[in-house]
Amino acid sequence: MADAQTTETMTTILAQHVGLEGPLLPILHAVQAELGFIPGDVVQMIADHLNITRAEVHGVITFYHDFRNAPAGKHIVKICRAEACQAVGANALSERAFEKLGVDWHGTTANGAVTLEPVYCLGLCACGPAAMVDGKVVGRVDHAKLDKILAEAGA
Amino acid sequence: MKIYVPLDSAALSLGANDVADAIVAHAKDNNLDVTVIRNGTRGMIWLEPLVEIETDQGRVGYGAVEASDVPALLDGTLDSLGLVEDLPWMKGQTRLTFQRCGVIDPLDLADYEAHGGLAGLRNAIAMTPAGIVEDVTASGLRGRGGAGFPTGIKWNTVLGAKADQKYIVCNADEGDSGTFADRMIMEGDPFTLIEGMIIAGLAVEATKGYVYLRSEYPDAIDMMEKAVVLARGAGILGADVLGSGRAFDMEIRVGAGAYVCGEETSLLNSLEGKRGVVRAKPPLPALEGFLGKPTVVNNVISLATVPVVLEKGAQHYADFGLGRSKGTIPIQIAGNVKFGGLYETAFGMPLGELVDTVAGGTLSGAPVKAVQVGGPLGAYMPRDKFDTPFGYEEFDGQGGLIGHAGLVVFDDATNMLGMARFAMEFCAVESCGKCTPCRIGAVRGVETIDRIGKGDADAIPLLEDLCETMKDGSLCALGGFTPYPVLSALHNFPDDFATQKEAAE
Ligand SMILES: Cc1cc2nc3c(=O)[nH]c(=O)nc-3n(C[C@H](O)[C@H](O)[C@H](O)COP(=O)(O)O)c2cc1C
Ligand code: SF4
Ligand code: FES
Ligand code: FES
């Protein structure tokens, strides 16, 4: 069972999405924006609200790369792995991030400061390598810029 | 003094907000009368942040500007690039779809109208639905999302379908590496997309629209949401579009990080709140699309080009281009290039001219090795194919595709076996899982390429075989076209596959 606070949050979110056609993705985005991830105990609440099975909600959550079922680190650093960024050194940049953080893709640093995610294109392909830090875009990320980003994030 | 500082996310990623803040602060400290306008980007990304100062002669450009340049910028001692309109990159283009991008404040409706905005919609309101469809068909406009299907013909199917509700769905999933035209226009001229969607609605008698916008584009999401609210407030969207008595309204929906959701049927499933699994066709989305209703699914650029077609006339648009590729195409130049950005030009420019002249060759200065055209499912073109003119049929004839018109340039330090491996890996990560050749084949593909890398020559025919199976047996182009980058790397750059073998022996 969800605690009282989560239940209240969920009631608000579900009420905000009444009347939408195809409301499940907007609901899941809202939950993740509010709670940082999609806790297992809200799945049934969403399922009941939309009159679908929890299997269906679970299936949707697991299909999409964006949704997480556990909290991320304090900051999320995404590094573009796609071709245009590879053409200007994205692979070496990722390697450096692995080394500095001591994690692989999807990993969170031991101190919980940074979660490292791959992303396949941020539309910054003419000023790569590209990265995104908590939703903010960064272009032409060289090793010095990366080190600065990671230091500021407390890694 | 009017100063333009772009808010396009490429400019933001290179410090445009710091520059804008510094301008405001410096002007305040020195009692200068300065108005900062945040525009979209002109598309010259290597010059971002590109600051423009309005003068009697026109807008003078400065770039790339850093916050520390601001005092010099404001006291007139910073070196300028001259008039932005006169820069070779701007002069060489034919800007139709992107005529306002970088010029206006993206959220200023008066500015939008002063630069030709809403003229197309006003013309459309005076026409019959069939008349609008005829014009779009006559313009020769083909879908810019990748497949190049004629937009007017698609609309005609939806117009002919009888239903109580029809939809316009804009595909703003733009997942292809090397492409950013959709993002650029949504951030730099969002009303154009809204206007195009309304015209589509009038043409097929749909009253509701959705933009399915990828979550990787938070700045574009924010801009589109603001623009929709403003358009609704101004009576452009709503129950009575510009007093026409006809209704059209729309919503922005955010994707969730799945490349395959750019495929139109997967996108519709996602929009309905389902897993983004590809649907078998038929039924066509035009007949049974969103929630089973007749639906136009079009790419951002296809829809954003409709206003200029209706504004300037179908013939004006169709007079540009080459063969069956009519009009202009916003080419996105990316990767290892000196001049990266967006270049809108009539179809027909040879690939080599785009790479060597427009893009100025590589940033590293090393020779160009390959150009991947059309995103992660596009072929790697070697230099001996550089005379291919930029057109749908022309690229098809060379075993390639133009897709969403992104060019990604690689220099000679690139290992093409590595790029082939990445193509298979990407397909494995992004497969929707519906069909076996893609779901299982992509993983086997990575393994097989690793075997080749370790020197196992027997794995080469296996890879060819696997690619044939994926081409023939996949339901959609993710599994079906991944063989393009893989086989083009193998066939055009055999040394990268052979060298590895010798090294291991
Ligand atoms: C795997 C895959 C990904 C696709 N991604 C996109 C995309 O991001 N944007 C897009 O407009 N079309 C994409 N398409 C093409 C769409 O299926 C569809 O053809 C297009 O949205 C139709 O619009 P258009 O006729 O205006 O091009 C993709 C297709 C496939 C197979
Ligand atoms: S080819 Fe791949 S992505 Fe396309 S339908 Fe089949 S499994 Fe899904
Ligand atoms: S490929 Fe990295 S931002 Fe597009
Ligand atoms: S219907 Fe989608 S894979 Fe068969």
Image: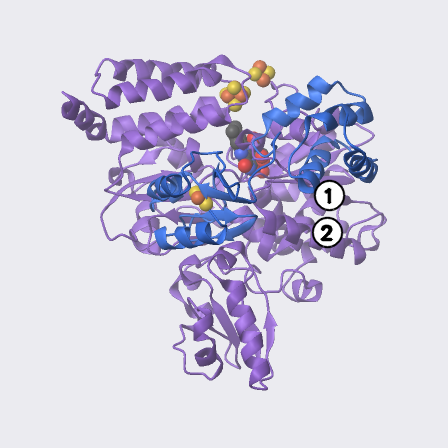
Chain colours: A blue, B purple
Q: Is residue B316 positioned above or below B385 on the image? A: below
Measured along the vertical axis of the image, is residue B102 above or below residue B198?
below
Position of B214 with respect to B340 (left or right) is right
Residue B294, how many percent across, how many down? 73, 29
Residue designated by label 2: B228
Which quadrant would residue A63 be assigned to in this image? top right
- Residue at mark 2: chain: B
Q: Residue at x 23, y 42 (%)?
A: B412
Q: Quadrant of ligand 3?
A: top left
* Disc on res. B251: 1
Q: Is residue B89 visible?
A: yes
Q: Amino acid at mark 2?
A: Val
**Amino acid under label 1?**
Glu
Asked whether A9 or B353 is in front, the reply is A9
Q: How many numbered discs? A: 2
Tell me, for residue A132, which label it has, or none: none
Q: Are marks 1 and 2 in contact (CB under 8 Å)?
A: yes
Residue at image point 32% right, 17% down:
B463
Residue farthest to the bottom? B31
User: Circle 1 sits in a helix, a strand or a loop, which is it?
Assistant: strand
- Residue A121 vs residue B350, the one in the foreground: A121
Mark toward the start of the polypeptide (1 vs 2):
2
